[in-house]
């Protein structure tokens, strides 16, 4: 019997990863209960690594002469991975944005409808025996223009979910050409500035997108917008959101991600902004769960294993 090749499961993953790996000749060694300092000395005894967002994969983790052959990122974003370092050492990287795109698309739609129909606010009031109908009159998505910034797996999944709402969907992606489809119309950023009622962010975190949604960016919109961020928190500073709400440039926001998601260690500016935003009924917070479903937990594993097999691992 041929011995299975071994890789490390550094961050917690769904148990389905182990039989899926076995099927393509690999054994996953679970070290998710160990600290990074405990893992470092043994890491180059294995040929591959599986990580989520918790672990940063770089020279500090792998050493100056790494021997691992692949890194599998269980999720979409790659901002916790030093891609230049891995490329220089011929280490393959796979990720699984296809695995949680449906979850993100559904979540973004749910968050948008919750804001437009005052659902969180109304729910809280009824729980406190307050019955206000007129004060919770909402608005319909039909007839609105939704601008999607970033038209990859996540942006397209959201556009697909909007298809039944008779709204106009404009998609902008700086790095794509001829990407229009039956769900979204290709548009310039200027067109979004002029026409959008709603903006949904689906961009990775890069040096270009960090603080992309800044005061100058928001000032470019002709109409007050509803803003959805299921991408990365660092794209939008909390203090910028406060200013935009106060000025009327943003009339509602749903944030699944924050610039600092360790709420007990916010700096002074972040803490001041967060304290203000917590009081606003037109701001919806969730703890980075847009892609976090029981189904996506398993889909991500399947996608990663399929991609590794396609690469010949």
Image (spheres, helix red, strand yellow):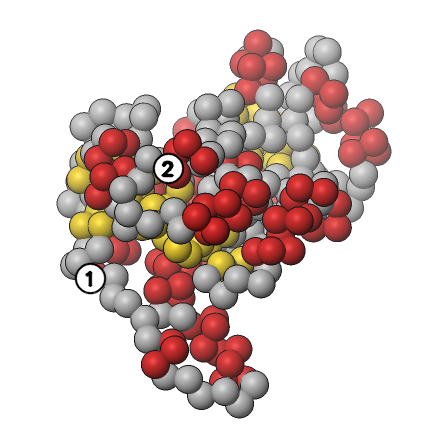
Q: Position of residue 286 (x, y in %)?
A: 54, 58
Residue found 58% across the figure and 63% down from its top: 279
Residue 219 numbered tag: 2
Residue found 81% across the figure and 38% down from its top: 35
Q: Position of residue 196 (x, y in %)?
A: 26, 45
Badge 1: few (under 14), some or many (20 or more) residues near its Cα, within 10 Å? few
Residue found 46% across the figure and 55% down from its top: 254
90, 133: nearer the viewer: 133
Between disc 1 and disc 2, the foreground one is 2
Mark 1 in CB contact with mark 2 (< 8 angstroms): no
Q: Earlier in the sequence, mark 1 or mark 2?
A: 1
Q: Position of residue 95 (x, y in %)?
A: 49, 34
Q: Is residue 23 visible?
A: no
Q: Position of residue 150 (x, y in %)?
A: 35, 36
Calculate the distance from the C-alpha at mark 1 to the C-alpha at mark 2: 25 Å
Residue at the outermost front position: 247
Q: Is residue 20 left or right of residue 37?
A: left
232, 131: nearer the viewer: 131
On screen, residue 8 above or below 169: above
Q: Element at badge 1?
A: loop
Q: Is residue 128 visible?
A: yes
On screen, residue 93 above or below 117: above
Q: Is residue 159 left or right of residue 235?
A: left
Instruction: Please state, as top left, top right, bottom left or bottom right, where the N terminus lies in the image.
Output: top right
Residue found 25% across the figure and 55% down from its top: 162
The residue beneath circle 1 is 142
């Amino acid at each position: 019997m041929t011995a299975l090749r071994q890789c490390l499961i550094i961050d917690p993953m769904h148990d389905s990863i182990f039989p899926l790996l076995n099927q393509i000749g690999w054994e996953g060694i679970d070290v998710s209960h160990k600290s990074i300092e405990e893992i470092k000395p043994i890491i180059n005894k294995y040929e591959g690594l599986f990580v989520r967002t918790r672990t940063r994969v770089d020279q500090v983790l792998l050493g100056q002469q790494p021997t691992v052959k692949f890194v599998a990122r269980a999720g979409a974003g790659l901002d916790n991975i030093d891609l230049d370092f891995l490329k220089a050492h011929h280490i393959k990287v796979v990720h699984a944005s296809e695995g949680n795109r449906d979850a993100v698309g559904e979540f973004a739609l749910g968050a948008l409808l919750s804001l437009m129909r005052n659902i969180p606010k109304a729910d809280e009031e009824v729980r406190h025996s307050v019955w206000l109908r007129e004060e919770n009159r909402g608005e319909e998505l039909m007839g609105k223009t939704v601008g999607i910034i970033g038209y990859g797996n996540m942006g397209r999944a959201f556009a697909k979910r909007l298809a039944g709402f008779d709204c106009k969907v404009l998609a902008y992606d700086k790095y794509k050409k001829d990407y229009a489809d039956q769900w979204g119309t290709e548009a310039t950023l200027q067109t979004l500035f002029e026409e959008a009622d709603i903006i949904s962010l689906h961009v990775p975190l890069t040096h270009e997108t960090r603080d992309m949604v800044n005061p100058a960016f928001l000032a470019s919109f002709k109409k007050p917008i509803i803003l959805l961020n299921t991408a990365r928190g660092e794209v939008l500073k909390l203090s910028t959101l406060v200013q935009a709400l106060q000025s009327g440039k943003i009339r509602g926001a749903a944030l699944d991600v924050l610039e600092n998601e360790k709420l007990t260690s916010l700096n002074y500016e972040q803490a001041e902004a967060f304290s203000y935003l917590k009081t606003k009924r037109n701001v919806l917070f969730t703890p980075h769960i847009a892609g976090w479903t029981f189904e996506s937990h398993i889909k991500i594993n399947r996608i990663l294993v399929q991609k590794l097999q396609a690469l010949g691992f």
